[in-house]
Image (cartoon, rainbow, N blue to C red):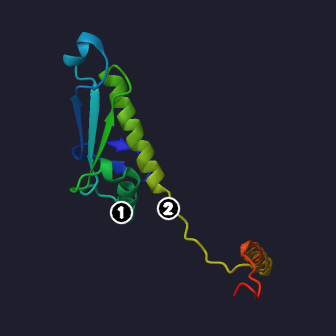
Amino acid sequence: MIKITDAVLIEDKYISVEFVRSPGPGGQNVNKVATAVQLRVNIAECPLPEDLKARIVHLAGKRRVTTDGVVIITARRYRTQEGNRKDAFDRLKALIRKACIKPRNRKKTKPTAASKERRLQSKGMKSRKKQDRMQIMSHDEA
């Protein structure tokens, strides 16, 4: 069981850890040892509040969430399984802690009188600038 906060706990049955081969340079050992970690967490079936699940999926992004609601975290920063496993769990905890923070609703405000005046001033300046660019035609040319 993983304790994220006092209120958020994820049981081991929703988590699976798989060791896979890590891509990139590594010499002869790279083809023999599976040091990268794929951590899979079935968020859809976890007994978490629905709004928290939605925020976790949103923060994880489309690339790290399957259509079944499984969040996949791949860690291959370290050269050992233990280091990558710890890194994957730390990243999972950070993701869920960030999702626990509810976003505040934006309060709609009206523009101030000064901001309206500044906007109209800048519009007038742009209009005059464009008017100055126009060629003046005399009555003889028309």
Q: Disc 2 or 1, which lies upstream in sequence?
A: 1
Identify residue type, mark 2. Answer: Lys
Residues at discs 2 and 1 in contact (Cβ within 8 Å): no
How busy is the neighbourhood of tag 1: few (under 14 within 10 Å), some, or many (20 plus)? few
- To which residue does mark 1 refer? 49
Mark 2: which secondary structure? Answer: loop
Residue at 52% x, 63% y is 103
In percent of width and height, residue 68 lies at: 21, 56
Q: Nearer the viewer, mark 2 or mark 1?
A: 2
Residue at 24% x, 52% y is 66
- Figure quadrant of residue 135: bottom right
In percent of width and height, residue 69 lies at: 25, 55
- Figure quadrant of residue 17: top left
Residue at 33% x, 24% y is 82
In percent of width and height, residue 65 lies at: 29, 51
> Is residue 85 positioned above or below 53 on the image?
above
Quadrant location of the C terminus? bottom right
26 displayed left or right of 90: left
Mark 1: which secondary structure? Answer: loop
104 displayed left or right of 67: right
Identify residue type, mark 1. Answer: Pro
In the rendering, which numbered label is found on residue 102?
2
44 displayed left or right of 52: left
26 displayed left or right of 136: left
Give the Cα separation between the discs numbered 2 and 1. Answer: 12 Å
Q: Residue furthest front?
A: 140
